[in-house]
Image (cartoon, rainbow, N blue to C red):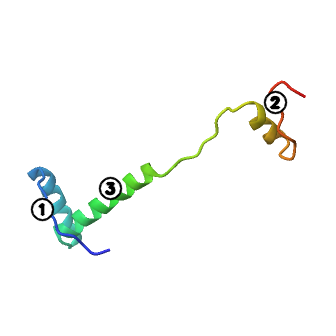
Amino acid sequence: MPTRRTTLAADGADLAVLEGEARRRGVSLAQVLREVVAREADEIRARRRPRFGLAHGGGAAWASVEDENAPVRERGGT
């Protein structure tokens, strides 16, 4: 995916921390900002993934757990 340029407005103290990190690592501030943006985007994507869980369905749901080849029966029935 191509890189897109944008303008960023941020707190000076926050940018100073990131600039210090960039200097420490010997990379540009832009590189550090790209990494921060990518990490945040990955976290957002992970939170949006569908999650499947188990719920108490009773009746046919429990019958299928106990014997997956059993025919579906009404709750409390035969």
Q: List the residue tagged with mark 2.
A: 74
Q: How far apart are the alpha carbons under marks 1 and 2?
A: 62 Å
Quadrant of the rendered image containing residue 76: top right
Which is more toward the observer, 14 or 44?
44
Q: Mark 3 or 2, which is nearer the eye?
A: 2
Q: List the residue tagged with mark 1.
A: 7
Tell which residue pokes out farthest to the left in this image: 12
Q: Are marks 1 and 2 in contact (CB under 8 Å)?
A: no
Q: How far apart are the alpha carbons under marks 3 and 2?
A: 48 Å
Which is more toward the observer, 10 or 59?
59
| Badge 3 or badge 1: first in the primary sequence | 1
Tell which residue pokes out farthest to the right in this image: 78
Horizontal arrangement in the rendering, residue 60 relative to residue 27 (left or right):
right
Q: Secondary structure at mark 2?
A: loop
Q: How far apart are the alpha carbons under marks 3 and 1?
A: 17 Å
Which is more toward the observer, 34 or 2?
2
Horizontal arrangement in the rendering, residue 8 relative to residue 70 (left or right):
left
Image vertical order of residue 33 relative to residue 76, above or below: below
How far from the left and from the top, in percent, is residue 27? 21, 73
How far from the left and from the top, in percent, is residue 60? 77, 35
Horizontal arrangement in the rendering, residue 29 relative to residue 56 (left or right):
left
Image vertical order of residue 76 relative to residue 3, above or below: above
Instruction: Tell me the crowding category of disc 2: few under 14, some 14 to 19, or many 20 or more residues within 10 angstroms, Cα based.
Output: few
Tell which residue pokes out farthest to the top in this image: 76
Instruction: Tell me the crowding category of disc 1: few under 14, some 14 to 19, or many 20 or more residues within 10 angstroms, Cα based.
Output: few
Res 23 visible: no
Disc 3 marks a residue whose amino acid type is Glu
Q: List the residue tagged with mark 3.
A: 40
Disc 1 marks a residue whose amino acid type is Thr
